[in-house]
Image (spheres, coloured by chain):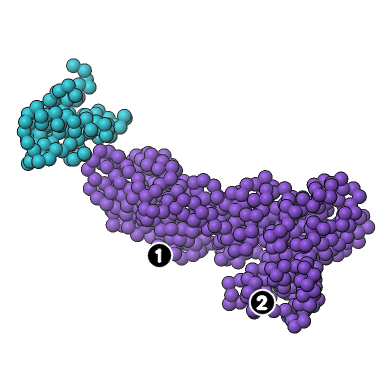
Amino acid sequence: MALARTHSIALVGVQGHHIEIEADIENGLVALLLVGLPDPALREARDRIRAAIINSKEAWPQRRITVGLSPASLPKRGSSFDVGIAVAILGAAEVLPAASLADLMFIGELGLDGRLRPVRGVLPAVAAAAAAGFGSVVVPADNAPEAALVPGIRVLAAASLGSLLGWLRGGCPADGAAGVTVWLGGSLPPDGAGQARADVPGRDLAELVGQPTARRAAEICAAGGHHLLLLGPPGVGKTMLAERLPTILPPLEAAAALEVTAIHSVAGALPPGGPLLSHPPFCAPHHTATKAAIVGGGSGLIRPGAASLAHHGCLFLDEAPEFARDVLDALRQPLESGEVVVARLGLTARFPARFTLLLAANPCPCARAAGSGPAAVGSAGLAARPAARAACTCAPAARRRYLARLSGPLLDRVDVKVEFLPVGRAELLSDRQFTEPSSVVAKRVELARERAAFRLRGTRWRLNGEIPGSELRRSYPPAPGALAPLERAMDLGEISARGVDRVIRLAWTVADLTGVARPTVTEVSYALGLWLGAAS
Amino acid sequence: MNAKDILGRRGEQLAVEHLQRAGLRILDRNWRCADGEIDIVAAERRALVVCEVKTRSGVRYGTPLEAITRQKRNRLRRLAIRWLVAHGILFDEIRIDVVGVLRSESGEFSVDHVRGVG
């Protein structure tokens, strides 16, 4: 008997690893041995593959079959190796010409009837196949549109094992075969024509009447990728604003769209049909979410969490103080490094997680506290707010505790704090003439982002919010003398050293939005106001 | 005699003919002891071959070869020692072979001989 070899991809996070599948058939009791650290789903592949081969009218080799997945030390999970294993076994049984299999990559799960069933994470797997130098890859027909997003690879979409075997027996013709269609990778329009926006159509920033400061803050956050805290009593439009932020973000660039789509592919959250996500995602987990749901994890296959699903988009935590403390603190790592690292026995999964954080909070548990004008909610401020809140029934200590859940290192990383004030009827009416539709604001945001991108050309960063502090101080100082307000605030202990960096980034975005070449005292003062939360 | 026993007899006869054609010397057939029965005892060069024959009239309940389990193989190893002790012959090697005989719907038999399963 003989040996045959095929190839597949194992995903760790959104990182694909090339796996060599070897099948060896030798004399011995009839058995199928699977080695190479399979997880339970993969161990069950033995029974799936046997049924699929027999139901595809092929003979099951009546010998001892050993299937090895190498590198043997990498734990392999899931069902996407089924097709590669089945083809390798038939190659070793000399039903298929083994030589023609050695250069092929197979991804897919087998149904008992021999159908190729779609699997998660096809996009990153096919991208890894292309990076490993494979020219063509076999995927289940249902995954073909997603696989074909990868440029420079030939995708063979097979409906069933039977039709795939027919194609292999026919010498792998370039134009496919019955039940095997050929897709050329990258042939789909990269801007994802036909893909609906991630947000609900009909939402528009102009609906947020009576909150001009908040609208302006949202614009600045969208332009610079800054994090935002929305503070205020219920019913003033915090959630409304957060949900409308995606409408003023520009569509994703091709590379970013592929990254975002890859993460959603691993999470199994891709819409069927037009799979490329070309608009910034918006992810709003409920406040009962666990740490694993937010940063990623889970037993078996490691799934990306909400922070990664919001990559290149917005992560909105409504009622932020209601989130468990450890959940909020787990966000500090991705906020700092732009990625989540999940460690498991034998492997470490990395998920990109560079998102704009939107936090919404009531000022206190009873949430009846009316705004009392400008309030300092900066790192020094949240606990020391004016207590003149007539309707509020909370004890001062309770109020302090409530927002203290958010304070500290997390709030230090939030660039813009906005306090929403309850709006009177007259203000609502008079503000109506100043509201702008999302499309107008989005144009300004796009222009500001272009200015930033032009300034940052030749670096890894695209947005002001992404520039590391050291680089910011070295290469992008504000105009001479512009730091005076910051120096004063530092002397008063109102701002930390990291806060200073954040304000400078913010000042750059304000300058980009207003078309100023370099932040002056005006922009820095405005940015400091936003950072302290005293701008309303 | 039951139909299944007639089928089994027929399969063993076909297996013996197959092994002889393959160059094995048949030493014993249906040798019994307290532990069980060996279908065929044969010799190939300096090796003792203990051979189990499994005959089936279809694959509805699995193929003949699949019916040989690890436990059955281990029992055959024990029986091989029993046979050697009973006959006092020395061999360099003891080998367990399995012969699967399958009767197709048209009544033809196919024989599959697997050498050295354990």
Label 1 secondary element: loop
Among the chains, which one is purple?
Answer: A
| Residue A89 in the image, given as x and y percentages of width and height | 31, 47
| Label ID, residue A133 | 1
Circle 2 marks a residue in which chain?
Answer: A
Q: Nearer the viewer, residue A178 or A488?
A: A488
Q: Furthest-top residue in view? A: B1
Q: Is residue A2 left or right of residue A253?
A: left
Disc 1 versus disc 2: distance between alpha carbons?
41 Å
Badge 1 or badge 2: first in the primary sequence? 1
Q: Is residue B74 left or right of residue A287?
A: left
Which image quadrant is residue A471 in?
bottom right
Instruction: Give the position of the N terminus of chain B as an image quadrant.
Output: top left
Tell me the shade of chain B: cyan
| Label ID, residue B1 | none
Instruction: Give the position of the C terminus of chain B as an image quadrant.
Output: top left
| Residue A509 in the image, given as x and y percentages of width and height | 72, 72
| Residue A3 in the image, given as x and y percentages of width and height | 27, 52
Q: Residue at x 89, y 52 (%)?
A: A389
Neighbor class of circle 1 (other Cα within 10 Å; few <14, some 14-19, many 20+) is few
- Mark 1 or 2, which is nearer the eye? 2
Circle 1 marks a residue in which chain?
Answer: A
* Count of numbered tags: 2
| Label ID, residue A473 | 2
Q: Is residue B40 in view? A: no
Q: Residue at x 76, y 77 (%)?
A: A483
